[in-house]
Amino acid sequence: MKPGYLSEFFSGVAMKTLSAVEADFGRSNQHEFNGVEGLKQIFGHATGKQTFQAKFIYLTDHDDEPVISEGFLTWYDAREAHPTRSEHRLYFPTTEVSNCAAEGDLLVIGRRQDGSVLVVVAEAESTVSNQIRWLFGFSDLVHPGFSVKAETESDQVKLEFASRLILDEIGIIQEEETPNFLDLMLDKFGKKFPPTRQFSEFARGTIVDLDPRDDPDAVLLAWMDREEVLFRALERHIVGDRLQHGFTGDVEGFISYSLSVQNRRKSRVGSALENHVEEILLKHSVRYDRTKVTENRSKPDFVFPGIAEYHDASFPAARLAMLGVKSTCKDRWRQVLVEANRIGEKHLLTLEPGISANQTHEMQANSLQLVLPRNLHGSYNDTQRQWLMSVSDFIGFVRARQQMQASPDSL
């Protein structure tokens, strides 16, 4: 187990694509998976019936909240009494999650470090199933059985910003330690959350050896990862202090406070990404305006070279560009399409890995170009990767536009 790596949370992971028999209880009442050798790597050789506490989660791109059930798994050898043969099986109960499962869905069985088990079912051909495969390092599931990664392999998977978001999605609580910075943050900000711009600047200042002019893709991810870790540390301290005071029966007060914590997390991460993108643009001497009004009171995150040029009808549209910034997309990417009517091809920067092919095809059909740090391109399929832009690519693109000379062809 290595802190900051996937093995911090899982001692072993098995993954497979659900078959019709496994997913359709109308065709099978066995409620069991055959315990192939791979599962033995996770659960060991069964002696009697071994029961494991389990959390079941069903994920789909269409629902904001996952379906969650609590239950158990039973691991046993159906031929334990046989002197030479064994036939291990993993029994699972009927739950709301198992009722959602369908043929082709992705199944993940993860043995937690505390001995419990996390069972995740992700909708077939969805963004979230791509992300789960990418998180655990399973590029292809070409055979019908389980693919397995033991703890030693999870020791090689370092957790960064995008992977931490996916862990949040499947309910894994992360408590990164930042002993070198908590006291400094409390001295600087007190027991309150500073403005996001100030906090983003502070986070960048804690990594002194990074220059976005060298590798903007890697630096953007490093800045986001550091800010997320620092924010969670400060949040645990501030929220923990508030919880110690209690709510003395004030249910509405507790709910209101809980919602404020969740909303702060969501809004802050988007603002942090904009802040770090802006710093990269400044370091590359790219001209821009941020969140200025275009048509219908829309406010694109970034307009290039500026809002004055955008509103100047004599300025060639071919020299304009815009960039939307969203840490995750889901269906919110469509908001970018109506934010700057003069610009035909729009760009969207995100940190979301593994967006489904159906979604990226729709983006292309709507003249929306996706921009991601290069390290996340590997979570997409080969065809998608040929189309994706990196942060460095986008900087080169927008600088080239700003260097264009007005000509009759660009009018």
Image: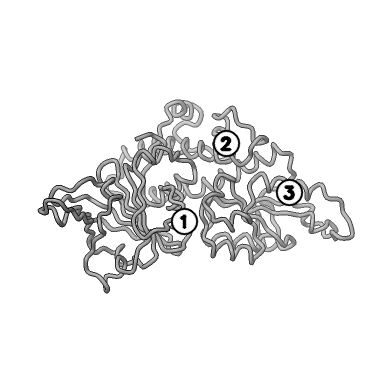
Task: Identify the residue at horizontal 44%, vertical 29% (top origin).
Answer: 182
Q: Residues within 10 Å of mark 3 (few under 14, many from 20)?
A: many
Give how far across and how far down residue 347 sits, in percent. Answer: 66, 55
Q: Is residue 253 visible?
A: no
Report which quarter residue 112 is drawn in: top left
- The residue type indicated by label 1 comes to Asn
The count of marks equals: 3
Task: Identify the residue at horizontal 58%, vertical 27% (top origin).
Answer: 208
Mark 3 lies on residue: 398
Disc number for residue 198 = 2
Q: Which one is in front in this view, the residue at disc 1 or the one at disc 3?
A: 1
Give how far across and how far down residue 330 sits, in percent. Answer: 51, 59
Which element is circle 2 on?
helix
Q: Is residue 66 above or below residue 246?
A: below
Report which quarter residue 63 is drawn in: bottom left
Give how far across and how far down residue 238 sits, in percent. Answer: 40, 37
Q: Along the polypeptide, which appears first: circle 2 or circle 3?
A: 2
Q: Residues within 10 Å of mark 2 (few under 14, many from 20)?
A: few
**Rounded to the nearest whole Å, what is the CA distance between mark 2 and mark 3?**
27 Å
Q: Is residue 336 left or right of residue 238?
A: right
**Rounded to the nearest whole Å, what is the CA distance between mark 1 and mark 3?**
30 Å
Q: Along the polypeptide, which appears first: circle 1 or circle 2?
A: 1
Q: Along the polypeptide, which appears first: circle 1 or circle 3?
A: 1
Q: Is residue 6 above or below residue 92?
A: above
- The residue type indicated by label 3 comes to Val
> As rendered, which of 406 and 244 lies closer to the eye?
406
- The residue type indicated by label 2 comes to Gln
Q: Which one is in front in this view, the residue at disc 1 or the one at disc 2?
A: 1
Q: Residues within 10 Å of mark 1 (few under 14, many from 20)?
A: many
Mark 1 lies on residue: 130
